Amino acid sequence: MFSEQTTVGINGTIAIPGDKSISHRSIIIPSISNGICEVSNILKSEDVLHTMNALKEMGVEIKEENKKIIIIGKGLESLKKPNKELYLGNSGTSARLLTGLLASQNFDSTLTGDKSLSSRPMKRITNPLTEMGAVIKTQDGKLPLNIKGSFLKNCKLEISIPSAQIKSGLILAALNTKGTSHIKENNITRNHTELMLKTFGADIETKKFGSSSEIIVNGKNNLIPKDIDVPSDLSSSAFFIVAALINKNSNITLQNININPTRSGLLIALEKMGANIKIYNQKTKAGEIVADINVKSSKLNGCELDKEIAKLMIDEFPILSVAASQASSPSFFRGLDELRVKESDRLELINHNLNKCGCYSEIQNNGLFINPDKNTEILDNEIRTDFDHRIAMSFAVLGSKIGKLNINEADSINTSFPTFKNEFNKAGGNLS
Ligand code: S3P
């Protein structure tokens, strides 16, 4: 029912910045290694800079030379008590990973964040750490966290919430704890921490059992410094992939994109929807799989996704929902509970904004039903983002198809993709 917006399409080779998850880990892990690491293609977004500033505040020497970040690690026990509270802005990854890192230090620390981060659940990380002997005070389960540095004991823990942030926080705690820790995740989630630690010579092993896995960490072993070349981010690529798919006359190329199978559920979902996506030049770099991707305009059909795949593409539902709203048949995505505790209540905001754009969607039992057969003209072009970067970018993409949308608080995009607007408009988008 929409008037087609762009006829020139979304085109070109898009510069996608470094992967956000790997960038956080590319600061934390070198900082506790024993030597000098050079990191190239790191994402310089607000979230990652918060992790970097926190480590600098704890005495780690981090500098920039010839576009590379140089980190001088002095070992697992080298961090110093910060002189002030560690402010982590909007970054859930910084908060959960650093809580794990700080719980075993010989000093106390306090973590704070912005309004959104201060409303997100932290007991999911502080509770299992407490079982290891950590002493952490929360404000009703939320930030600020007061962490009392403590000797931790090795653990046998089972994580039932699908979360790589929880798993990674626990692994970081186990690294600085004597003996062997067993961390079982009932749902396989992104494994960047495990892969990177392996390349740093950590004594870490993953055993897979169907859809769950057990990570076994032997603590108190030195980490050997390694240079890191951060692959480009599939989650950031997703906005361009969908923009190219839903707009006519589009053809884009994305290079050196991380397609780690614990992250690439979106590609499976889009393939089911009939997307014209080619993946080539596949290679492995430091344990991570990277490839180039070509995407052309496609007639998409709807699809049904089960909760199992949600863990492999948890950040991509806002943009996948935009794709589904422009397909030729209905979609249903199940098991989206975790979307409610992201940078915003994403499930609510996707539904709310799709409806404003005249796209039919309904939340059913923490799943999302989208039926493009019932789409109408845009009802209201003001997009509410609650400062959530992924909601902002997803609706900017929808605006390139159905007509310009006003994305409120679009500055939030800087948390993960500071060059988005430039790249998007250069490729044919219309974000002001
Ligand atoms: C991340 C894990 C995911 C994801 C976030 C980054 C990470 O969160 O949503 O953007 O870097 O570990 P959860 O693991 O809590 O689902």
Image (spheres, rainbow, N blue to C red):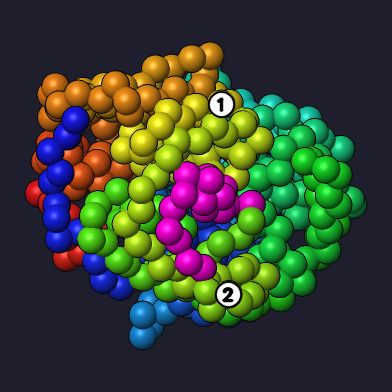
Magenta-drawn segment: 262-279
Left or right: where does residue 255 sit relative to residue 285? left
- Separation of residues labelled 2 and 1 (CA atoms): 30 Å
* Mark 1 closeness class: few <14, some 14–19, many ≥20 residues within 10 Å: some
Tell me where residue 147 appears, x and y as whole percent. Answer: 59, 36
Q: Quadrant of residue 223?
A: bottom right
- The residue drawn where x is 19% and y is 23% is 376
Going by the numbered disc 1, the residue's amino acid type is Arg
Tell me where residue 95 appears, x and y as whole percent. Answer: 51, 41
Going by the numbered disc 2, the residue's amino acid type is Gln
Q: Quadrant of residue 319?
A: top left
* Mark 2 closeness class: few <14, some 14–19, many ≥20 residues within 10 Å: some
The residue identified by callout 2 is 282
- The residue drawn where x is 39% and y is 17% is 362
| Residue farthest toward the top in the current orientation of the protein | 365
Tell me where residue 121 appears, x and y as whole percent. Answer: 53, 26
Q: Is mark 1 within 8 Å of ligand 1?
A: no
